[in-house]
Every structure is written in structure tokens, then in C-alpha cells.
């Protein structure tokens, strides 16, 4: 059986940068891409597919932030650019309001990775050195319980996402920190 012929990362990177101007959102895309690639690798799945979904999952957010538009408008753009439905569907599934069943591992992975990766980055950025090397799963767990910290992070979706992967939350946090560590310099998480 031959490998699928996915669009290349350069094309995805160009689309991301065409629609996303915020350095923070670009770093978020890179962070989620790293986590998704690590998950695919760990589960012997398609690393390129998972990486593309991670890199592009929020590419339309700046222009279409509203529920009902975010990922829906982006899906139209990606289809027009020749991206296959499996990528578009996975991206659209990470927005709960789209009501797309998370019936594949890639869909469950993007849903679980998005909010929690952003939260771990937020925990890192409040550290005095802003270094990922100082972040432990335990410190992230403690911050998750603090409802005043990173209020925009939907804790229910964090817990639901981890349940969908059938993994312990603390172990998944440690996994994400490990997946981000090689990219820490590029993400400004290791000054």
C-alpha cells in the first residue's frame, strides 16, 4: 500500500502565514504541530498528516474568529487549495460547535492537543525565565485548578480531550512538554 500524497508542509506554511499575522498564533500553530507529530510518531500513525492538521488548525482564526466561521471558512480555503477532506474534517472537528464526530485518532488528537498545548505555553510564559525546562506536569496541574489563570482556556475541553485519548492528564502534560522541548528555542520558550 502506498503512502498518501499529502500537500507539502511548505504549502501549509505559506497558507498559515498568508492568513495569520500574529506571532503568538504562529507560535501556537508550530507548538501544536510539534505535539501532533509526536503523537503520530508514538502511535505509529501518519506524521505528515498529523503535522499538517496541527499547523493549520487555527490558520483562519484571525480573519474568522466567530463560532460558525472559524474552521468553516478555513475549510473552504483549504479545499480550494487542494487539501484533502481528511485534513479539513480533522481541523473542523476541533471546534466543538461544529458537531463533527471525533471518530478518528487524528480528530481526537487535535482536540486534545490544542487547548492543553496553549495552556502549557501560558504556564511557561509566567515563569521567571520563561523556560519550558522549568515546567513540570505537576505545576501545570496546579495552574489548571486555578480558574483565574488563563481564563480563556476551556478546562472542560481539556479534560474531555484527554478522556478521548484515553490517557492520564498528568502523563499527557508531560508528553506535551517533552514534544515541545526540541522546539523550545523556536517558540521563545527557552531564552
Image: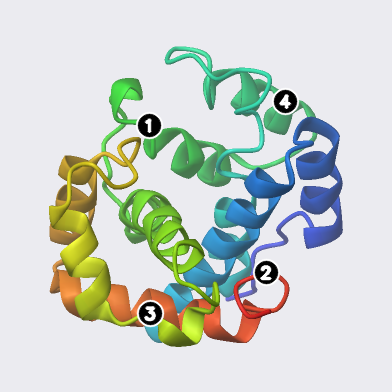
> Is tag 3's residue or tag 4's residue first in the polypeptide sequence?
4
Disc 2 crowd rating (10 Å Cα; few below 14, some 14-19, many 20+) is: some
> Is tag 3's residue or tag 1's residue first in the polypeptide sequence?
1
**30 to the left or right of 10:** left
Under tag 1, what secondary structure? loop
Residue matched to label 4: 77
Q: Quadrant of residue 5?
A: bottom right
Of labels 1 and 2, the one closer to you: 2
Of labels 3 and 1, the one closer to you: 3
Q: Does residue 69 lie above or below 132 as drawn?
A: above
Report how far apart the C-alphas of labels 2 and 3 lie in the structure. 14 Å
Q: Is residue 34 at all visible to an observer of this figure?
A: yes
Q: Nearer the viewer, residue 22 or 98?
A: 22
Q: Quadrant of the N terminus?
A: bottom right
Q: Are the residues flagged by discs 3 and 1 in contact, CB closer than 8 Å?
A: no
Seen at 42% across and 60% down, the residue is 117
Residue matched to label 1: 95
Under tag 4, what secondary structure? helix
**153 to the left or right of 52:** left
Q: Does residue 60 lie above or below 64 as drawn?
A: below
> Is tag 1's residue or tag 2's residue first in the polypeptide sequence?
1
Q: Quadrant of residue 106?
A: bottom left
Q: Quadrant of residue 97?
A: top left
Residue matched to label 2: 188
Seen at 77% across and 26% down, the residue is 80
- Could you say which disc has been placed on residue 135 in the image? 3
Residue 89: x %, y % from top left: 47, 37
Residue 79: x %, y % from top left: 69, 30
Report how far apart the C-alphas of labels 3 and 1 lie in the structure. 27 Å
Q: Does residue 8 lie above or below 57 as drawn?
A: below
Report how far apart the C-alphas of labels 4 and 2 lie in the structure. 30 Å
Amino acid at each position: 500500500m502506498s503512502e498518501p500524497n499529502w500537500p507539502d508542509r511548505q504549502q501549509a506554511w505559506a497558507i498559515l502565514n498568508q492568513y495569520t499575522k500574529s506571532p503568538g498564533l504562529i507560535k501556537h500553530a508550530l507548538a501544536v504541530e510539534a505535539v501532533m507529530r509526536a503523537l503520530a510518531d508514538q502511535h505509529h500513525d501518519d506524521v505528515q498528516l498529523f503535522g499538517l492538521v496541527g499547523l493549520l488548525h487555527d490558520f483562519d482564526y484571525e480573519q474568522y474568529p466567530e463560532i460558525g466561521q472559524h474552521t468553516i471558512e478555513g475549510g473552504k480555503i483549504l479545499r480550494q487549495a487542494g487539501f484533502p477532506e481528511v485534513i479539513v474534517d480533522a481541523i473542523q472537528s476541533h471546534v466543538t460547535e461544529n458537531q463533527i464526530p471525533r471518530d478518528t485518532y487524528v480528530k481526537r488528537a487535535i482536540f486534545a492537543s490544542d487547548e492543553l498545548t496553549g495552556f502549557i505555553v501560558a504556564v511557561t510564559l509566567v515563569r521567571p525565565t520563561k523556560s519550558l525546562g522549568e515546567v513540570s506536569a505537576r505545576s501545570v496541574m496546579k495552574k489548571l485548578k486555578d480558574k483565574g489563570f488563563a481564563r480563556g482556556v476551556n478546562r472542560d475541553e481539556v479534560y474531555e480531550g484527554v478522556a478521548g485519548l484515553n490517557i492520564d492528564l498528568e502523563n499527557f502534560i508531560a508528553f506535551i512538554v517533552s514534544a515541545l522541548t526540541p522546539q523550545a528555542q523556536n517558540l521563545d520558550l527557552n531564552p
